[in-house]
Amino acid sequence: MRSTPSRDSVNRRTAGACLSALMLLLCVPVGPASAFKIVAPADGAVLTSGQAVPVEIEAGREAGLVEVRYYWYPEQTEALVEQGEERTGKPSQGSMATEKYWQQDSITGAPVVALPALTSTVDRVPPYGGALPVPSDAIGRMRLLAIADISQGRLGRKTVFDEVFVMVRPAADLLSIDFETEKPLQLGRTGQSSAYGHVDSLGKIFELPVVGEFADGVTRPLSSPSTGTKYTSSDDHILKVLPDGLLQIVGNGKTSLTVTNRDQQATLDIRVEVNPEANEPPIANAGAAKTVKAGAKVRLSGLQSRDPEGETLFYAWSQIRGSKVAMLDVNMPEPSFTAPYVSETRTFRFKLRVTDKKGADSLPAYVDVTVEP
């Protein structure tokens, strides 16, 4: 005759089974919690200017997400000014109302100001995403920066970011291309003196604005090679073409600069009359890449920059990647900033250009700072 197990033995077996199941669950490896991330559009995607594209993020481990703001920047744009609206949706008091609030690109001198292309909350579909308009005049390699506000209750707010790089192409045909400058162009005057690049001089590096008229009626900037633009100088001993659409004065005389894009072409006659005193351009060195923890004080170093003639250098630092940080002493050899909070390892990129007292510029130098949580 089979004996019936006692209630105590059944309870012991049940408890043992539950304990085994719990131990099994504890032993199952759990994947790392994901960080705030742009899911769409994907990095490297090809988009059409003027269209609205679906944008989507993953909040990851971040709790208390309030809103996400999306900004468009041309690839090499400096300053990364995050300007726009207060959380109420009303324009910030005095925002960009006077010239002192505008930051300028160190090469073109143009103001660099970003307004959010989209501000999204949990009510959107998908949450914190939606239909993101691509700027109608965008063309070439663009950077999409997403800034998320995270509520910390009584501690206020913190921000996290992610960014992707995409290629933007207009659907319309290019009808014409031209230089946006006086014609013919006169650079410098004989006998002119210089102080930190305020005038044209031998070795000076600059960019000429180039625009294209497209069949959709939109005028788009075409100065960057990422837009398909190519430059040719008729005399490299007077005007030299450098990478990234930059030009450098290397001698006096007459030359012409030809720009081509999508089978369209334009030519600009240029006369250069600068002080003929020989002057080698300085060389910028932005220092070695570094990895730091969030909250650490970071000091960049341009001390290895040099001028072949031993001239005193003028420094110009700017930021071209990552959410904007507050840099101190951007016109000194060693600017500094505090590494911001990040939810995942993120890269911040900085650019340095140096100028000697005669006005000759260096090519840009870059340094990456990797910030870890």
Image (spheres, rainbow, N blue to C red):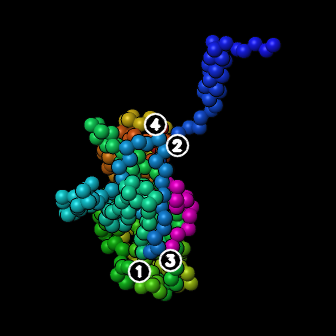
Q: Residues within 10 Å of mark 1 (few under 14, many from 20)?
A: some
Disc 3 is placed on an element classified as loop
Residue at numbered disc 2: 34
Task: Measure the alpha-carbon separation of dots 4 and 2.
Answer: 13 Å
Disc 2 is placed on an element classified as loop
* Disc number for residue 373: 4
Which corner quadrant holds the N terminus? top right
Residue at numbered disc 3: 170
Q: Confirm whether the magenta stretch covers residue 39.
A: yes
| Mark closer to the chain start, 3 or 2 | 2
Task: Measure the alpha-carbon separation of dots 2 and 1.
Answer: 41 Å
| Mark closer to the chain start, 3 or 4 | 3
The magenta-colored residue range is 37-49
Query: Whole-percent x and y of residue 2?
Result: 79, 15
Q: Residues within 10 Å of mark 4 (few under 14, many from 20)?
A: some
Query: Residue shown at 46%/48% (left/top)?
Result: 59
User: Are the residues flagged by discs 2 and 1 in contact, CB closer than 8 Å?
Assistant: no
Q: Amino acid at mark 3?
A: Pro
Disc 4 is placed on an element classified as loop
